Image (cartoon, rainbow, N blue to C red):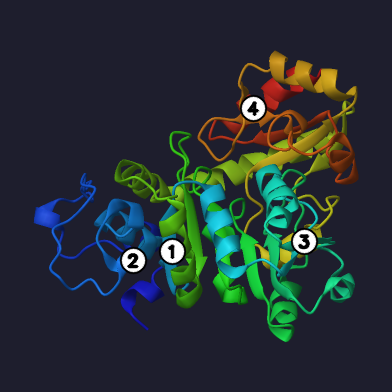
Amino acid sequence: MSDSEKWGVSTKLVHAGEWRPRVLGAVSMPIFQTANWVEDGDASDYHSVHYMRLSNLPNHTVLAEKMAALEGAEAALVTASGMAAISAALLSVLKAGDHILVQDELYGGTHSFVANDLPRWGIEVDFIDGENPSSWEGKLRPNTRAIYFESITNPRLRVANLDAVVPFAQAHDLVSMIDNTMATPLYFKPAEWGFDLSLHSATKYLNGHSDIVGGVVIGKADLVTQVHHKLDHLGGSMDTHTCSLLHRGVRTLALRLPAQTKTAQALAQMFQDHPRVTRVYYPGLESSAGHDNAKRLLAGYSAMVSIDIDGGKEAAKRFVERSQLITDAPSFGGLETLATRPAASSHAGLTPAERAERGIADGLVRLSVGIEDTADLLADFTQALD
């Protein structure tokens, strides 16, 4: 085992993948602002030509090595967005005539892609109950090729029987894929549980500053290479300035996320006791669906809290408007506390019937807890509800 493999996660965040010796003595990784490089004639194929769109410049490769080290995986790839990572990964393992099993609660963009786009390309999809593994085999077909989950679901923050996914996939020769955005490598390491591919929207906690869009694919080297080659043709490459910002942001993940998680737990407890809140979704609450799974599988519960407010849509809108500290904006994982109604943002692409089937009410508010003082957020949210 190398020294880097023995390092703790905070040390890996700072040092894994970094060049030794430093580039011309620069402590921070320089931005290589060039689309192309002088070739030495040794490129073995199209994908090995040094070119920014092929995601193989130093800013790409250093960041990818760091991300692979964080999850203890063989390889990684950075992409232009989380959806670039997800779509390239799915299209690299699926073709016309194939079938995939997909968890029945997903981020809205992923749901739209698998429910609407994949079938147009001849790929069949079945949704499965992530908390009922005994039901999965009944959805298998001879042409099933992959199974797809989220470590913490968006927006109701459920944790499925994730430890059942890999044995099921291996028993039926399926590629196991998981969106690990909400848990992050800090709280869940898919490779250690045997998952083939782990996907991230780096826009969220990995970057942590609400100022870039990016994605990451992490996993087994042969599969990451397949995804990389697919991405080369789709064009979803990350620009080197964005690489530099993500590189800077990810190094503080181990400081940011635990502080946000601690506040999220306190807010979830407050919401649970407040008469105006009819339901709280947070993996760290014993009353939340999937809490036993979260306690068994995750090293932390992350910093997202969703609530149903008595009074539905209008009450939810008033809560957000009356808060002095909430920023009403989509996405999550930044330093500031954000709130959004998924029915009007991340899951607006689902039909009302699809949202109702998945328990996404018009009055559901999803909170991304920031790094503000816990006491200030507790006081502000209490007065906004009252």
Q: Which of 361 and 54 is in front in this view?
A: 54
Kind of residue at badge 4: Leu
- Looking at the rendered structure, the number of numbered marks drawn on it comes to 4
Q: Mark 1 near mark 4, Cβ–Cβ under 8 Å?
A: no
Mark 1 Cα within 10 Å, few/some/many (few <14, many 20+)? Answer: many
**Residue at 15% from the left image edge and 70% from the top image edge:** 41
Q: Residue furthest left?
A: 24
Q: How far apart are marks 3 and 2 (CA)?
A: 30 Å
> Going from the N terminus, do you reach mark 3 or mark 2 first?
2
Q: How far apart are marks 1 and 4 (CA)?
A: 42 Å
Kind of residue at badge 3: Val
In the rendered view, does 21 fall on the left or right side of 149? Answer: left
Q: Which residue corresponds to mark 4?
A: 377
Q: Which residue corresponds to mark 3?
A: 125
Q: Which residue corresponds to mark 1?
A: 228
The N terminus lies in quadrant = bottom left
Question: Which numbered dot is residue 133?
Answer: none
* SS assignment at label 4: helix
